[in-house]
Image (tube, rainbow, N blue to C red):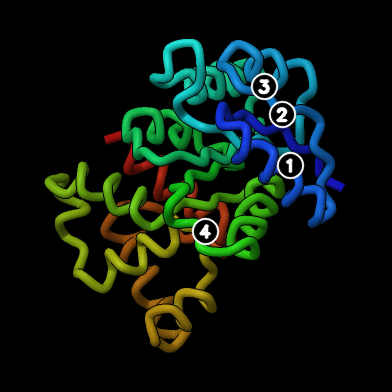
């Protein structure tokens, strides 16, 4: 049973998350509403996964992400799932840059059902990634002028975005209406163009791609 910490300043959303997670078998160890309380909770409780809003009291700017970054410096690989209305590209890169995984970034208004959200929570708790396609698109767009990325075909970029969301070749195949062999070929091309060694480990290959993007 995974232990979850929630950091959200809006009472109704915070309470709703508590009940949703408990209904799906999670144990909520704390539900906090400020950046300092989040950092203390992350370091003292060491939850299996934390669901974090970006903008928390006292200044409502970036306390959630700052606390998450500081906690991961002290506890490498501490699982963090950002749930926000905003795409903070700089901090998204910082969270992803160490390549240790256990990171998610979802946009509140693009979480369409409980199953999608719970799947993302479990994926991050297990050390994987769960990235909203819009977040990935903005990260890729900010790197679009980099020569290796510019060399990707439109289809390869679609495959790369799906990989960055944490999807397997089979899932990418279903989503893009391609055969698994075609997805494997596109994946090999992506690795070659980005100078990344191929890997059969889906999580490691996604983290490698994200680390590459964030290092440019």
Q: Name the residue under label 2.
A: 31
Q: Mark 3 points at which residue?
A: 75
Q: Mark 1 touching mark 2, by CB under 8 A?
A: yes
Q: Mark 2 or 3 closer to N-term?
A: 2
Q: Mark 1 points at which residue?
A: 18
Q: Mark 1 or 4 closer to N-term?
A: 1
Q: Mark 1 or 2 closer to N-term?
A: 1
Q: Position of residue 92 (x, y in %)?
A: 40, 35
Nearest to viewer (mark 1 / mark 4) = 1
Q: Where is residue 30 in the image (x, y as percent from the top left)?
A: 77, 27
State the residue at coordinates (76%, 25%): 46
Q: Mark 1 touching mark 4, by CB under 8 A?
A: no
CA separation in Å, label 2 and label 3: 20 Å
Please identify the residue farthest to the front as the structure is shown: 12
CA separation in Å, label 1 and label 4: 25 Å
In the rendered structure, the answer to whether residue 52 lies left or right of residue 190 reads right
In the rendered structure, the answer to whether residue 121 lies left or right of residue 139 reads right
Q: Mark 3 touching mark 1, by CB under 8 A?
A: no
Disc 2: CA contacts within 10 A as few (<14), some (14-19) or many (>=20): many
Quarter location, residue 74: top right
Q: Name the residue under label 4.
A: 166
């Amino acid at each position: 049973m995974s232990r979850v910490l929630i950091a959200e300043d809006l009472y109704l959303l915070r309470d709703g998350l508590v009940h949703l997670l408990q209904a799906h078998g999670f144990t909520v160890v704390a539900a906090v509403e400020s950046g300092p309380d989040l950092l203390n909770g992350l370091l003292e409780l060491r939850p299996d996964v934390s669901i974090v809003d970006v903008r928390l009291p006292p200044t409502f700017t970036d306390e959630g992400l700052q606390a998450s970054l500081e906690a991961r410096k002290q506890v490498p690989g501490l699982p963090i799932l950002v749930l926000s209305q905003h795409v903070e590209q700089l901090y998204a890169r910082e969270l992803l840059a160490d390549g240790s995984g256990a990171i998610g970034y979802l946009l509140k208004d693009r979480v369409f059902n409980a199953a999608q959200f719970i799947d993302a929570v479990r994926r991050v708790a297990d050390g994987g990634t769960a990235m909203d396609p819009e977040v990935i698109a903005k990260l890729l767009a900010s790197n679009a002028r980099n020569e290796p990325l510019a060399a990707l075909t439109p289809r390869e970029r679609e495959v790369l975005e799906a990989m960055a969301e944490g999807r397997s070749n089979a899932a990418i195949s279903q989503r893009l209406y391609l055969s698994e062999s075609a997805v494997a070929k596109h994946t090999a091309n992506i690795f070659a163009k980005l100078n990344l060694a191929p890997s059969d480990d889906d999580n490691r290959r996604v983290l490698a791609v994200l680390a590459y993007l964030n290092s440019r």
